[in-house]
């Protein structure tokens, strides 16, 4: 099988270097064969310190350690590659950047968060549909091995609810729960799927909490630890018992490995591993939770 020529847009996140390492270092114990990262556009957001402070260092590392060529435009990345990792850390820029990539029709992974508003998220998915461009967006936590094994084990019956928690850092340019809450929301949606109809949120200096009501009566919660625990944990409630699982099992890069595998499968013609409809609902869930954080009211999705 032909090795895919992969491009990257946005070199301002630790994920950029992880993907470069997993793809381009054959000696890496978690090496993902089938594609090579060959070129990329560095990008960066001047008003977002976690972007501006990292883009130069990471882009240089990708050049010097992994042989990735820097190019001057997003369009050039699309023209020269078979598939694209859109890893810009700032969710505000994804709509504009994807608008350049979409007309080429090449598979694109958009790192979390897809967007910071439902309007931008819908615009991205509508662009993808109009050009027939395969696309998906997700947190790598969704692809944690222990979480997926627990989701597959139906010996205690079907899932009737879920409680998920993880670290939650707040960033002014990435409103409310979008910046790190999306990891925990991805676990929740991996467990329950789509169908949430309302959400209510509560917050203080140490904890963020949101509870969702699903159309079929199931209830799912996400708890963000502003201070305290750093593990991503899910409690899956089934018909005949409940199970707690560390989503990543301490193997952080394995989640990225599994995500990259899914990306390569999609680039080879498989359906996206996460449906556009579910991702759009997840973004709306976080948007509604942010609204509830301010008003204290239950918000309909």
Image (spheres, helix red, strand yellow):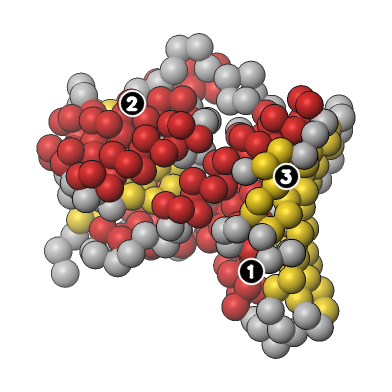
Residue in the picture at 61% in, 35% down: 287
Secondary element at tag 2: helix
Tag 2 and tag 1, C-beta contact below 8 Å:
no
Residue in the picture at 27% in, 31% down: 99
Secondary element at tag 3: strand
Residue in the picture at 60% in, 78% down: 152
The label nearer to you, 2 versus 3, is 3
Left or right: 13, with 64 as reference point: right
Residue in the picture at 87% in, 30% down: 204
Q: Which residue is mark 2?
A: 96
- Mark 2 surroundings: few (<14), some (14-19) or many (≥20) residues within 10 A: few
Q: Which residue is mark 3?
A: 199
Q: What's the distance in space between the residues labelled 3 and 1, CA to CA? A: 27 Å
Decide which of 213, 39 is in the foreground and name it: 213
Q: In the image, which disc is placed on residue 146?
A: 1
Residue 12 in picture, x, y percent from top left: 44, 28
Q: In the image, which disc is placed on residue 75?
A: none
Q: Earlier in the sequence, mark 3 or mark 1?
A: 1
Q: Earlier in the sequence, mark 2 or mark 1?
A: 2
Q: Earlier in the sequence, mark 2 or mark 3?
A: 2
């Amino acid at each position: 099988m032909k090795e895919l020529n992969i491009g990257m847009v946005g070199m301002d996140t630790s994920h950029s270097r992880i993907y470069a390492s997993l793809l381009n270092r054959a000696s890496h114990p978690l090496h993902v064969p089938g594609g090579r990262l060959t070129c990329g556009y560095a990008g960066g957001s001047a008003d977002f310190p976690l972007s501006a402070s990292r883009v130069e260092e990471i882009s240089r590392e990708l050049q010097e350690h992994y042989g990735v060529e820097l190019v001057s435009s997003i369009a050039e990345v699309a023209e020269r590659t078979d598939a694209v990792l859109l890893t810009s850390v700032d969710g505000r820029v994804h709509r504009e950047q994807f608008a350049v990539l979409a007309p080429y029709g090449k598979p694109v992974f958009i790192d979390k968060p897809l967007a910071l508003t439902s309007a931008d998220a819908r615009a991205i998915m509508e662009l993808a549909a109009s050009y027939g461009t395969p696309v998906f967006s997700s947190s790598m936590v969704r692809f944690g091995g222990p979480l997926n094994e627990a989701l597959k084990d139906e010996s205690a019956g079907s899932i009737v609810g879920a409680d998920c928690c993880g670290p939650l850092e707040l960033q002014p340019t990435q409103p409310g729960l979008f910046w790190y809450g999306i990891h925990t929301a991805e676990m929740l949606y991996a467990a329950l799927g789509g169908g949430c109809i309302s959400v209510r949120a509560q917050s203080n200096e140490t904890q963020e909490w949101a509870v969702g009501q699903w159309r079929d009566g199931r209830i799912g919660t996400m708890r963000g630890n502003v201070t305290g625990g750093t593990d991503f944990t899910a409690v899956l409630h089934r018909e005949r018992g409940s199970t707690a699982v560390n989503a990543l099992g301490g193997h952080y890069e394995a989640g990225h490995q599994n995500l990259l595998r899914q990306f390569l499968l999609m680039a080879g013609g498989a359906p996206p591993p996460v449906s556009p409809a579910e991702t759009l609902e997840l973004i709306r869930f976080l948007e509604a939770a942010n609204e509830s954080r301010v008003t204290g009211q239950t918000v309909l999705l």
